[in-house]
């Protein structure tokens, strides 16, 4: 599988921070700790990169080693992956809880709110954050995102991997990934009503030959982002699923476009 071009030394040199475990209210219980990498000017507006399944913040290393100009870059280890909690037991298939863990990173910098970039299963989680916090997200980039519940059709291998017997012997990341995939249809159904709450501009990037997340997801997103300031679909011909490592320049251009749009807008009073 492709990955970032940054070497181990460059990744090791990136700054890491942790949001400690916290109480999220009686209905949600405890939100586990969230670990994240960050780079760039901490006084500038922020872009937050959210990985798919399995994955980790390291997958976005190229975007942190060389941040999009004028922005602070943050890449999270989603719950159940990398250095984030929970450290043992089940992962966290709930999009709502994954979103809750990331929400404290939504900071206002001179009236400019973060741009969210989500790849694969990180796409619907980024959308959940934007739908639950419509005034705190400045832009949304969904890369090969799996949002359409009708496209969540696990194959035989996934159904076997999600059985209790097999999951008991899988490594943590893969085990948690299988748990997420097993629940993805239900979670995208729960996400659907929130999509109309998204008011920021949205850029969707998707390859026509994506064998893991069908390009048909783009039509679903066009129909569901009814309140977005704008919806732009960037179609990549003959491109598969691994856009962040095979076509990173397209993601950078999308982030820069949304950043320029925020900078051109008047600051909030």
Image: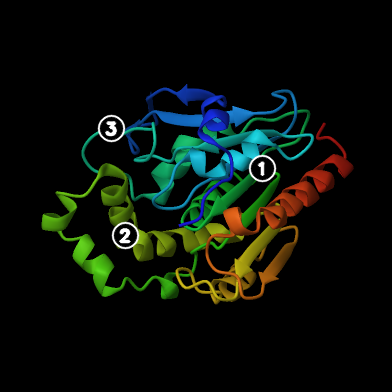
1 vs 3, front mark:
3
Q: Nearer the viewer, residue 172 or 61?
A: 61
Q: Hey, which quadrant is residue 231 in on the image? A: bottom right
SS under mark 1: loop
Residue visible at 73% across and 65% down in the picture: 232
2 vs 3, front mark:
3
SS under mark 2: helix
Q: Hey, which quadrant is residue 171 in on the image? A: top left
SS under mark 3: loop
Q: Position of residue 190 (x, y in %)?
A: 42, 60
Residue visible at 25% across and 73% down in the picture: 156
N-terminal of the two: label 2 or label 3? 3
Mark 1, residues whose alpha carbon is within 10 Å: few (<14), some, or many (≥20)? few
* Left or right of 136 in this view: 132: left
Q: Position of residue 131 (x, y in %)?
A: 57, 51
Residue indicated by mark 3 = 87
Residue indicated by mark 1 = 135
Circles 1 and 2: CB atoms closer than 8 Å: no
- Name the mark on residue 183: 2
* Left or right of 216 in this view: 42: right
Q: Nearer the viewer, residue 193 or 82?
A: 82
Circles 2 and 3: CB atoms closer than 8 Å: no
1 vs 2, front mark:
2
């Amino acid at each position: 599988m492709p990955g970032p071009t940054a070497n181990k030394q460059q990744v090791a040199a990136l700054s890491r921070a942790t949001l400690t475990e916290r109480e999220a209210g009686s209905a949600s219980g405890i939100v586990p700790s969230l670990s994240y990498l960050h780079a760039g000017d901490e006084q500038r507006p922020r872009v937050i990169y959210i990985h798919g399944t399995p994955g980790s913040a390291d997958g976005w290393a190229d975007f942190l080693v060389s941040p999009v100009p004028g922005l602070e870059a943050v890449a999270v280890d989603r719950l159940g992956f990398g250095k984030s909690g929970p450290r043992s037991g089940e992962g966290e298939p709930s999009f709502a809880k994954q979103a809750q863990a990331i929400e404290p990173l939504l900071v206002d910098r001179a009236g400019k709110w973060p741009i969210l970039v989500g790849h694969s299963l990180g796409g619907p989680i980024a959308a959940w954050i934007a739908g639950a916090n419509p005034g705190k997200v400045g832009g949304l980039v969904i890369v090969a995102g799996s949002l359409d519940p009708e496209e969540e059709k696990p194959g035989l291998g996934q159904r076997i991997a999600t059985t209790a017997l097999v999951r008991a012997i899988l490594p943590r990341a893969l085990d948690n990934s299988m748990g997420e995939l097993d629940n993805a249809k239900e979670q995208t159904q729960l996400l659907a009503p929130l999509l109309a709450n998204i008011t920021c501009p949205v850029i969707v990037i998707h390859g026509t030959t994506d064998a893991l997340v069908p390009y048909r997801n783009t039509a679903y997103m066009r129909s569901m982002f009814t309140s977005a300031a704008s919806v732009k679909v960037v179609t990549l011909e003959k491109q598969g699923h691994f856009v962040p490592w095979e076509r990173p320049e397209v993601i950078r251009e999308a982030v820069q476009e949304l950043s320029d749009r925020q900078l051109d807008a008047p600051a909030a009073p």
